[in-house]
Amino acid sequence: MAPVFSVLFAIFLATQAQAAGAIENPIIAAAQQAETELNARVGLAIHDTGSGNSWQYNADERFPMTSTFKVLACGALLARQDVGDEDLSRQVPISQSDLVTYSPVTETWVGQDISLAALCDATLRTSDNTAANKVLEALGGPDAVTTFLRSMGDEVTQLDRWETELNEATPGDLRDTTTPAAMVSSLHELLLGELLSPAAQATLTQWLEGNEVGGPLLRAGIPDDWRIGDRTGAGGHGSRSVVAILWPPSQAPLLAAIYLTQSDASMEQRNAAIAAIGTALAETVSSMR
């Protein structure tokens, strides 16, 4: 699948200059406003699979992934199941020593054996950090996610550490980073490409649509009649992020990756800035269709 990834990634990079210069575009304007008002570094990549339109802002700059890596990890696990190297019904034990900060689901599972499918559900539905670590453990560690990404053509994204250290988001640290363009291309491979079986894609999409903690971000900015599956993230140095697949009514889906970092703004302010980008996206798409 590497050639497909490379072509899509090249399209993103080729159109970045055009999008960055389109000051009148509401999406780019919203990103610039977030940078200014929050004194932050902001990057985004959005691809409309129906029209072929793309919008980017700092799309080839690296940003901390924070919890957005979780969609990649569960995608990797599904890919292994597709080829018979894993079974998501396999159960693994949860012990007290496994628990890390923010584990609202797995803290209720201590002493039990839990399926990998349930762990991915908890990872993507609530961003449970212990569940994510158990998924990484099943894969063979963070490096296994990077290896999986390289195998499908993503030469940019890298996962180096476990939860919760991967959320440090120290400026200039390349560990546990991606670019918006690379993330959108990887989302395309996982959710809309031919890498995963239709059943695996449906499962991954269902997990993303079930996200219970993304309400204040993109979900707050788009119309109620849009479908969305997303995974949010937060980390040090004011990092906030969301990756998503969105379906306007009766239209082909859009893929989005929005990253914000190096800001002293409150969580509420960062959420509102991303929601404003979502509103600008909805207005832009609606005006073009």
Image (cartoon, rainbow, N blue to C red):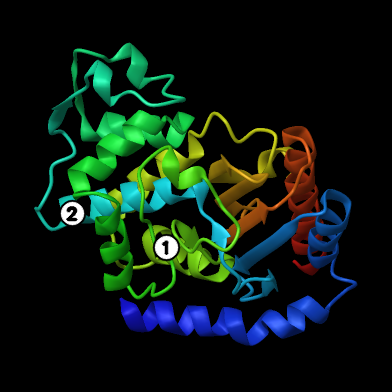
Disc 2: CA contacts within 10 A as few (<14), some (14-19) or many (>=20):
some
Q: Callout 2: helix, strand or loop?
A: helix
User: Does the residue at mark 1 contact the one at mark 2 (Cβ under 8 Å)?
Assistant: no
Residue ID at (48%, 64%): 174
Drawn side of residue 115 relative to residue 275, left or right: left
Q: What residue is drawn where x is 58% and y is 65%?
A: 180
Q: For the C terminus, give its image quadrant.
A: bottom right
Q: Which mark is residue 15?
A: none
Q: Nearer the viewer, residue 3 or 51?
A: 3
Location of residue 148 in the rendering, given as x and y in whole percent from the top left corner: 27, 63
Q: Residues within 10 Å of mark 1 (few under 14, many from 20)?
A: some
Identified by mark 2, the residue type is Arg
Q: Which residue is mark 2?
A: 80
- Looking at the picture, how far across and down is residue 176, in whole percent? 44, 56
- Rounded to the nearest angstrom, the CA distance separating label 1 from label 2 is 17 Å
Quadrant containing the N terminus in the rendered view: bottom left
203 on left or right of 228: left
Q: Is residue 19 above or below residue 256?
A: below
Residue, disc 1: 192
The residue drawn where x is 38% and y is 60% is 190
| Up/down of 99 relative to 21, above or below | above
Disc 1 is placed on an element classified as loop
Whichever of callouts 1 and 2 sits on the residue coming sooner in the sequence is 2
